[in-house]
Image (cartoon, rainbow, N blue to C red):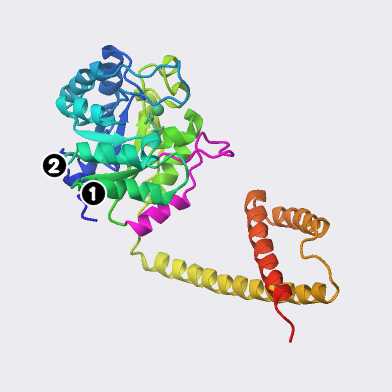
Amino acid sequence: MEIVNMKDWGLGLDPSKGPILISGPCSAESEQQVLESCLGVAKHRVHILRAGIWKPRTRPGTFEGIGAQALPWIKRAGRETSLPVTVEVANARHVYEALKNHVDILWIGARTSVNPFSVQEIADALKGVDIPVIVKNPINPDLALWMGALERFNKVGIKKLAALHRGFSVSNSAPYRNSPMWHIPIELRRRLPEIEIIGDPSHIAGKRALLREIAQKSLDLSFDGLMIESHINPDVALSDAKQQVTPDGLKELLDSLVKKEVASSDPLFVSNLESLRADIDRLDREVIELLSKRMEVARQIGLYKKENNITILQMSRWEEILNNRIKEAMAHGLSEKFITSFLQDIHNESIHQQTAVMNKETA
Ligand code: PEP
Ligand code: MN
């Protein structure tokens, strides 16, 4: 994809201020709230101001945003701070209103990027328009949908494109509101290295206390920016009250983040890292050899069961393995979640291999 990086969007996003920082309230609620929130955060290394004008709420009957009437408020905040502004658009009418009010950047929400029809409608409305678009990941953990949304914009000629990682709605996301599932943005980076990624600790964490760790992790993974919701008085915010920070809270959060280098030229560091990586390579080879030996034993058991006419899956044996191994692994500092899913994968493969042995015609 032909992509223009954020610093070249022609909006004066100054990389010397650090990673691109987008901040402002979850929702525009009143002109005063938008101005106070935005002017407050503009003092703290913010590059772009945000505010939700049309709010996609999970349940009806909650605050659904002020609508187009709030667009001049955010534009005024932009003028008074000399910063570009961004709002979420979810259909062609939103695009029309946002463009009419000279919004600088559009963002696509998670409930929109999940739906190719909506994404295409917005992309079609942007044909021939030179405006940057930031695409949040879809609410469900589907990398192809996220990539597909980025591609739909690129296909209509949008080159000023970035992705935004806001976490995924899954049944077990505790302690977060949305599970970060870091492997998905990492895979996005591998598949589309030209696309810059912005982290959204607010919608992942869901609460202020967890913002820092998510923001730090995003930077440690070399994300190119952060979007952090802030509100002049978060506790009375009409949406996402628990996760928004005050302008002072934003400063405190930013000050607590540690900047790490992507690479180092210090020869001692380089040689130590190389030797640790060699250890990892050797251990991975050992793990593969052990797994292959384990499968060999599983195949022998399969053969033996076949000769004796015994079923493959024996629930009590599997439960015994799971319980014992989980205990052992946890005593070795591995997490229950990791070892459970690792064992399940091994077990599935064993069953697969045993089935192949049992179904094989004997000569
Ligand atoms: C938001 O940014 O306020 C928002 C609605 O986010 P998401 O689309 O990630 O839920
Ligand atoms: Mn929000």
Q: 191 left or right of 301?
A: left
* Residue 250 percent across, percent down from the top left: 37, 29
* Residue 217 percent across, percent down from the top left: 44, 45
Q: 129 left or right of 122?
A: left
**For the magenta stretch, what is the residue range?**
166-192
Residue 47 visible in the picture: no
Is label 2 within 8 A of ligand 1 (CB to nearest ligand atom)? Answer: no
Q: 59 left or right of 100?
A: right
Residue for badge 1:
154
Give amino acid for label 2: Gly
Q: Quadrant of residue 12?
A: top left
Residue for badge 2:
128
Give amino acid for label 1: Asn
- Main SS, magenta residues: loop
Whether 276 is drawn above or below 207: the answer is: below
**Residue drawn at x 29%, y 51% as measured from the top left:** 195
Nearest the eye: 303 or 294: 303
Give the structural element (helix, strand or loop) at label 2: loop
